[in-house]
């Protein structure tokens, strides 16, 4: 488990070094008046300054109650209401993504987002709901263990760091913690980033046509 977190740490540092600001970064500033029609030009294309995006991926997490590494997969819809950002999403986890799914979690959160031309950083926190089961000692069972169901409300915290391959498409990591009275998970995911920022080509620009034998 330590090797996994060391790997995720070095990946995040590398992306942070690569994602240095440029002179065409997103111009959004905290002290500016909200303008839903604001746009930025990047590689001859127009993109919304205020935009929604989706993240999805797979990863691993440690569970103190299970004393093992859990595999997980999930996604989030990250959206804005005026100049404030929110998140809704969830994940499923187990000893394997193919079987033994022992925990289903959904969450919602409020957060902070910083978007630049080459990276997207976000931090979200909010309530969560988890449903699953734990194996507990049971002398009456032939295996010595029996499943105990739980339905718990807890808290969820996540941070995303994405390196953009294009302005609206990227890859990154997400570190998270999910805590409730019966079950906790601490881990990370490799995520894909899909933004709804694209608005079309800049006015007056005509993209070059691909080579054609008819030309």
Image: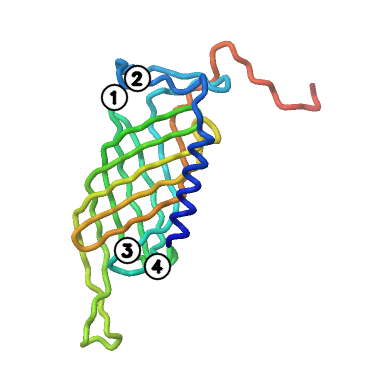
In this image, 116 relative to 147: left or right? right
Single out the mark in the foreground, 4 or 3.
3
Quadrant the C terminus occupies: top right
Tell me the residue that label 4 is attached to: 95
Q: Is residue 108 above or below residue 167?
A: below
Estimate how packed mark 4 is, as few (under 14), some (14 to 19) or many (20 or more) residues with alpha carbons within 10 Å.
Answer: some
Tell me the residue that label 1 is attached to: 82
Tell me the residue that label 3 is attached to: 63
Q: Secondary structure at mark 1?
A: loop
Q: x, y percentage for residue 159? A: 36, 43
Q: x, y percentage for residue 150? A: 21, 65
Residue at screen point 36% across, 37% down: 122
Single out the mark in the foreground, 2 or 3.
3
> From mark 4 to mark 3, how far is it between C-alphas?
11 Å
Label whose residue precedes the other's in the sequence (2 or 1)? 2
Label whose residue precedes the other's in the sequence (1 or 4)? 1
Q: x, y percentage for residue 146? A: 25, 79
Residue at screen point 77% across, 27% down: 212
The part of the image, by quadrant, that contains residue 134 is bottom left
């Amino acid at each position: 488990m330590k090797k996994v977190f060391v790997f995720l740490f070095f990946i995040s540092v590398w992306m942070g070094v690569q994602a240095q600001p440029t002179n065409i970064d997103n111009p959004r500033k905290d002290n500016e008046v909200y303008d839903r029609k604001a746009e930025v030009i990047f590689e001859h294309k127009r993109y919304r300054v205020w935009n929604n995006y989706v993240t999805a991926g797979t990863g691993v997490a440690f569970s103190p109650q299970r004393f093992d590494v859990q595999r997980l997969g999930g996604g989030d819809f990250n959206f804005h209401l005026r100049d404030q950002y929110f998140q809704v999403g969830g994940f499923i986890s187990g000893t394997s993504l193919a079987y033994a799914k022992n925990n289903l979690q959904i969450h919602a959160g409020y957060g902070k987002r910083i978007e630049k031309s080459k990276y997207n950083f976000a931090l979200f926190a909010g309530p969560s709901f988890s449903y699953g089961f734990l194996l507990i000692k049971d002398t009456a069972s032939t295996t010595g263990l029996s499943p105990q169901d739980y339905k718990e409300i807890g808290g969820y915290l996540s941070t995303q760091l994405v390196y953009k391959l294009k302005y609206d498409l990227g890859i990154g990591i997400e570190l998270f913690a999910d805590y409730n009275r019966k079950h906790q998970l601490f881990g990370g995911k490799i995520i894909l980033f899909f933004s709804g920022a694209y608005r079309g080509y800049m006015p007056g620009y005509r993209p070059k046509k691909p080579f054609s034998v008819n030309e």
